[in-house]
Amino acid sequence: MKCTRCRAAAEVHLRQHNSAFCRTCFVFYFQRQVERAIDKERMFTRDEAVLVAVSGGKDSLALWDVLITLGHQTTGLHLSLGIGDYSDQSTAKTVAFAQARGLPLITVPLADDGLAVPEIARLTRRPACSACGTMKRHYFDRLAIDRGFPVVATGHNLDDEAARLLGNVLHWQMEHLTRQRPVLEPTHDRFVRKVKPLFRCSEYEAAVYAFFRGIDYIVDECPNAAGATQLLYKDMLNRLEAASPGSKLTFVQEFLHKAQPALTPATVAPPQTCERCGMPSYAALCGFCRLVRETDAKRERRQAAGRA
Amino acid sequence: MHITILPNRKQLELTGRRRAADVLRELGFLPGTAMVIRGNELVPEGHMLEADDVVEIRSVISGGAP
C-alpha cells in the first residue's frame, strides 16, 4: 500500500478517507485537519492564549502537540482527580510531556481541596463520572476566567462527539442537541469560549498521531469508565463504521450542517451568579458549590458519628 | 507470535503468519479500534505478521473524558 500523498510505503490506512499515509504525511495530514477545524469554525486566533485541558490521555496530549506545532500560545491545565494509581500516572505523563517541551502547565490536585473523585462519589453516593464532570467544568471555567484565557480547548474527538450525538438523539435531548457544537460561545461574562479542535478526527487517528509523535500517554482506562454508556454507543458506531466507512463523520458533520440549524433553542434566561463562588449558576448555588456543600455536610456528619 | 493486548495487559501466543486484520478480528477488535504495533512500527491491517513477531495490540477506544 502506497502513501496517497508521496507514494512511499504507507504505515496507516484510513478507510473513511479512502487514503493511506506514510508516517510523515500522516502527521502532516492530522495537523492540517486540526488547523482547518480551528480556522473554519473560528475557534481562536494566533493572538489568543489557549488553555488546553490535558488529562494525560492520547487525545488531549495529541491536541496540545498539534497546537504548539502550529504556533499557538498555550498553557496546559491538568486536574489530578485523585483516582489512585490511574491519576498518579496521568499526572506524571502530563507533567513529563510539558517539561520535555518547556510548556507552562497548571496542575490542580483535587484531593488537596478534599475533592478526590472517589471520596466525593462515596460521600454523596453520586456516580463518579457525574461528580467528575461537574468538577472539571467548574475548574476549567474558573481557572480560565481568573487567569485571563479567552478560550479553553478540550481533546474531544469525532468518536466522542458521535457517541454523544447518538445518545442525545436516542433520548431526544433537544436542549442538548441545540448546544452540541465544536465551538460554544460564553453565555455569561464569567464563562469563556470552549472549543473542540479534534472534533473531526477519529479516536484511531488521534492514537496513531500520538504514537507517531512519540507521545507517552496513559493507555490504562479510567477505572470508573467500565460499563459506561458512551462505550456502548461507541461500539455501535464502530460496527456501523466497519460496514460503511465514513458514517461517523457524516453523522456528526451533517447534524451540524443540516439538522442543528433547524432546531429552535428553548428560551432560557441567562445564568445568574453563584452566591458562594461567583461563577454562573441557574440556582442560588452552582452545581459545583452544591456538590461541595453536600460533601462537607456528609463529611461532618460522619466525623460527628465517629466521635459519638 | 507473542501478543500483548493493552490496556488490559493480556498476553497470548498465536501460531503461524497472519494478516494483521485477521489477528484483530480473531481477538474481537473492530476495524479502526486498535493499533497493531511491532517494535516502533505501526502495522497496517493488510500487512502480514510473522510467526516470530512480538506484537502489541493497543486499543484506542476510551470511555472517559479526554
Image (tube, coloured by chain):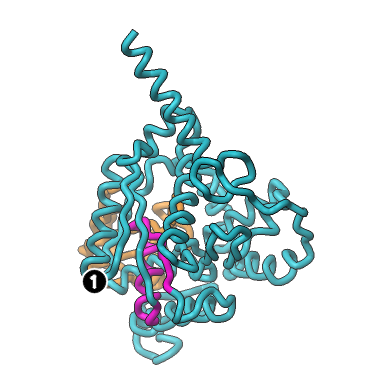
Between residues A103 and A245, which one lies in front from this camera angle? A103
**Residue A273 percent across, percent down from the top left:** 59, 48
Task: State the residue position of label 1.
Answer: A102
Question: What's the colour of chain A in the image?
Answer: cyan
- Give the answer, above or below, for where B14 lies relative to A103: above
Give, as a three-letter code, the residue at label 1.
Gly
Q: Chain of mark 1?
A: A
Q: Give the side of residue A34 with respect to residue B7, left or right.
A: right
The stretch in magenta equals A49-72
Between residues A5 and A256, which one lies in front from this camera angle? A256
**Residue A300 percent across, percent down from the top left:** 39, 22
**Residue A251 percent across, percent down from the top left:** 65, 65
Between residues A185 and A164, which one lies in front from this camera angle? A185
Q: Quadrant of the N terminus of chain A?
A: bottom left
Q: Is residue A236 magenta?
A: no
- Please tell me which residue is depicted at 25% across the width and 60% down the height of the picture: A95
Q: Which chain is orange?
A: B
